[in-house]
């Protein structure tokens, strides 16, 4: 037993496929998906606990997508894949940031009204 004959044969190194990691853009959208999943779970849990839907959450549901779009514009520009150069990147990211903040300002008070008496 000490001579090593009882070990299973291992695959040769050349038979394995190389690991292909996700691009930064795919990782950013994966995080957007995780945020949406957490938002939906929290909303459904609230519904199960109180038998009422959360109203006025539409603007808050836009925020992760806007953050993902802004991140995508920056990541594509940094990777050299963005079309048009720096100006469209700045315009898209700025518009996403402004809309993100606007939706937070509108959505958070609407969400908090659900918790008041």
Image (cartoon, helix red, strand yellow):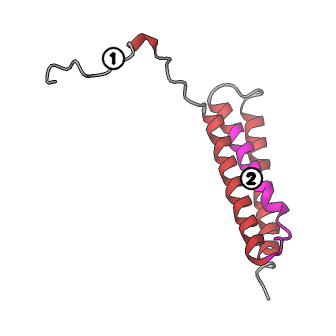
Residue 99 is situated, as x and y percent measured from the top left of the image, at 80, 55
46, above or below 8, in the image: below
Tell me the quarter of the image containing the C terminus: bottom right
**Location of residue 113 (image quadrant):** bottom right
**Could you tell me which residue is drawn at 69 percent across and 48 percent down?**
32
Dot 1 falls on a residue whose secondary structure is loop
The verdict on residue 63 being magenta is yes
Identify the disc placed on residue 49: none
Residue depth check, mark 2 versus mark 1: number of the one nearer the observer = 1
Q: Which residues are magenta?
A: 51-72
56 vs 107, nearest the viewer: 56
Q: Which residue is mark 1?
A: 9
At label 1, counting other C-alpha atoms closer than 10 Å, the crowd grade (few under 14, some 14-19, many 20 or more) is: few
77 vs 71, nearest the viewer: 71
Most common SS among magenta residues = helix
Tell me the quarter of the image containing the N terminus: top left
Identify the disc placed on residue 97: 2
Q: Earlier in the sequence, mark 2 or mark 1?
A: 1
63, above or below 48, in the image: above
**Could you tell me which residue is drawn at 65 percent across and 35 percent down?**
26
**Could you tell me which residue is drawn at 67 percent across and 32 percent down?**
77
Residue 59 is situated, as x and y percent measured from the top left of the image, at 83, 61
């Amino acid at each position: 037993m000490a001579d090593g004959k009882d070990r299973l044969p291992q695959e040769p190194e050349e038979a394995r496929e190389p690991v292909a990691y996700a691009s930064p853009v795919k990782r950013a959208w994966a995080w957007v998906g995780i945020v949406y999943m957490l938002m939906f779970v929290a909303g459904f849990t609230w519904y199960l606990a109180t038998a009422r839907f959360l109203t006025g959450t539409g603007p808050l549901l836009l925020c992760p997508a806007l953050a993902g779009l802004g991140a995508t514009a920056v990541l594509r520009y940094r990777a050299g894949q963005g079309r048009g150069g720096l100006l469209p990147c700045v315009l898209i990211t700025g518009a996403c940031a402004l809309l993100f903040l606007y939706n937070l300002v509108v959505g958070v008070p609407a969400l908090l009204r659900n918790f008041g008496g």
